[in-house]
Image (spheres, rainbow, N blue to C red):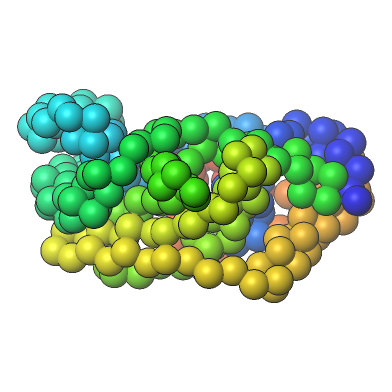
Amino acid sequence: MLDQKVFEKFDLLPMSFSKLNSFSNYPCQFIINKIYKIDTGTNPAMRVGHLVEEMLHEKIIGKEPDLALYQNKLEEELCDYHDQSRLNDYIDYIPKFYKQCLPLFDYYGNYQLQSYQEEIKTNIIGVDFIGYTDFIFDLDDSLNVIDLKTRKRMTYNHSDKLQQWVYRKALEEKYKKPVHTNLHVVTPTRYQRVELEFNDDIEIEIHNKLKGMASLLQKCNTPEDIALLYQPNLDGWEWNEQNIPARKQIWGI
């Protein structure tokens, strides 16, 4: 079991899968957003994902979403986004993504929607976790969790599976019944429903990621200590007008 005080030292509790994934795969961004608490804003891809989820939820509860309203909402929210060409692409994607979501409605339309964006909590080797599911359907003897992914290409990542393992664990503890987890991945032209299966390796991997984070944090006393362990690759794809000022503030480059 890990000591939660190691994570409390840097105000990282409750832990979330997004924090753990950012630490493992995007350490400099983790340092900017979670250690130094600098808000670098959102981007069109992330925001469109949230908006399309809202649209699908409206459809499921019997309300036809206004596509133009959601397109205008994205345009207004990100009116100062540094790459307006990319923003315009995602504004155009909204109705296309939504169209590829409709097969999910057709498939689950006769089942009861248990919840949307339900808060879930669990504890993993002594560390408190929190998260929010997309859609949960009640199938009487079990629950089906649907995680909607909006992407430009038809891909799903290993991190998607790790995240859903955490959510499944929390939901099985809460509802005391089997939980089936699925990804519904949509692109502007296609969709794919992926039923996830898990083995013991997933749990071990998540435990190891947490232990690795704890080991690092234990050795550090200040945000500066953590930042010195990671030097940003200035040629990396992730740097743009939104987060370069934060990079310069922390690393001076």
Q: Is 36 positioned to the left or the right of 160 in the image? A: right
From the viewer's side, name the closer residue of 164 and 159. Answer: 164
Q: Tell me residue 103's x, y (percent).
A: 18, 55
**Image quadrant where residue 33 sits:** top right
Considering only vertical position in the picture, is 210 above or below 248? below
Q: Among all residues in the image, which is located at the extreme front?
A: 141
Q: Is 252 positioned to the left or the right of 70 in the image? A: right
Q: Is residue 107 visible?
A: yes
| Point 89% across, 36% down: residue | 5
Q: Tell me residue 89's x, y (percent).
A: 16, 50
From the viewer's side, name the closer residue of 24 and 207. Answer: 207
Q: Tell me residue 49's x, y (percent).
A: 32, 45
From the viewer's side, name the closer residue of 93 and 235. Answer: 93
Q: Is residue 26 visible?
A: no
| Point 87% across, 56% down: residue | 215
How many numbered callouts?
Answer: 0
Q: Tell me residue 251's x, y (percent).
A: 66, 48
| Point 71% across, 64% down: residue | 203
| Point 59% across, 47% down: residue | 177
Q: Is 252 positioned to the left or the right of 214 in the image? A: left
